Image (spheres, helix red, strand yellow):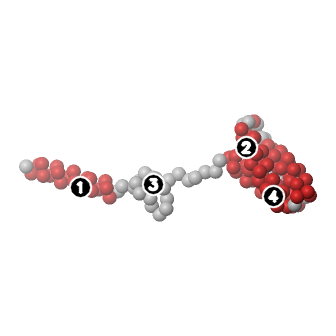
Amino acid sequence: MAVLGLALGLALLAGASATACDNSGSEGGRSPGRAGVPPSPRTTPAQELCARVVGYWSRKVLDSDTYGDYQTMGLSNGQYEILRSVVDAARAVKRRQGAEAADQLIDRRAHEGCADWYRTGGPSNGPWQ
């Protein structure tokens, strides 16, 4: 009988310890993870990063009216090709319809250009792409 009581006591103790260490709830606004393992950070898809950087530099080039070196901008050759196309279109729209229309066109064309570029392989087309 003492052995059964001891076994029951150990089982209850083990169950209480497991419940106390349960990490299934949210902690400090973070998503749950395994005990001692932080949740994975969220990542931005490469296509979206491409659109952001191309959009940023397209606005800079449009405002300065001059192109810089793609490497100093942190762009690949493929991203630079997208930028040149976006800026050429934005210049024409800015003259006809104003800066706000050009700004909207930059966002749209950067997303479209990067989507096309990644659909066909993106930077994997070559080391300089």
The residue wearing badge 4 is 103
> Disc 2 residue type?
Ala
**Residues at marks 1 and 3, CA–CA distance in whole angstroms:** 25 Å
* Disc 3 secondary structure class: loop
The secondary element bearing badge 1 is classed as helix
- Circle 2 packing at 10 Å, graded few (<14), some (14-19), many (20+), is some
Label 1: few (<14), some (14–19) or many (≥20) C-alpha neighbours in 10 Å: few
Q: Which residue is mark 2?
A: 115
Q: Nearer the viewer, mark 2 or mark 3?
A: 2
Question: Mark 4: which amino acid?
Answer: Asp
Q: Earlier in the sequence, mark 2 or mark 4?
A: 4
Tell me if I can see residue 68 in this picture: no
Q: Residue at x 35, y 56 (%)?
A: 21
Q: Earlier in the sequence, mark 4 or mark 1?
A: 1
What whole-number distance in Å separates the C-alpha atoms at marks 4 and 1? 64 Å
Q: Residue tagged by mark 3?
A: 32
Q: Nearer the viewer, mark 4 or mark 1?
A: 4
Which residue was labeled with disc 1? 13
> As rendered, which of 95 and 124 lies closer to the eye?
95
Helix, strand or loop at label 4? It is helix
Real-space Cα distance between discs 2 and 3?
33 Å
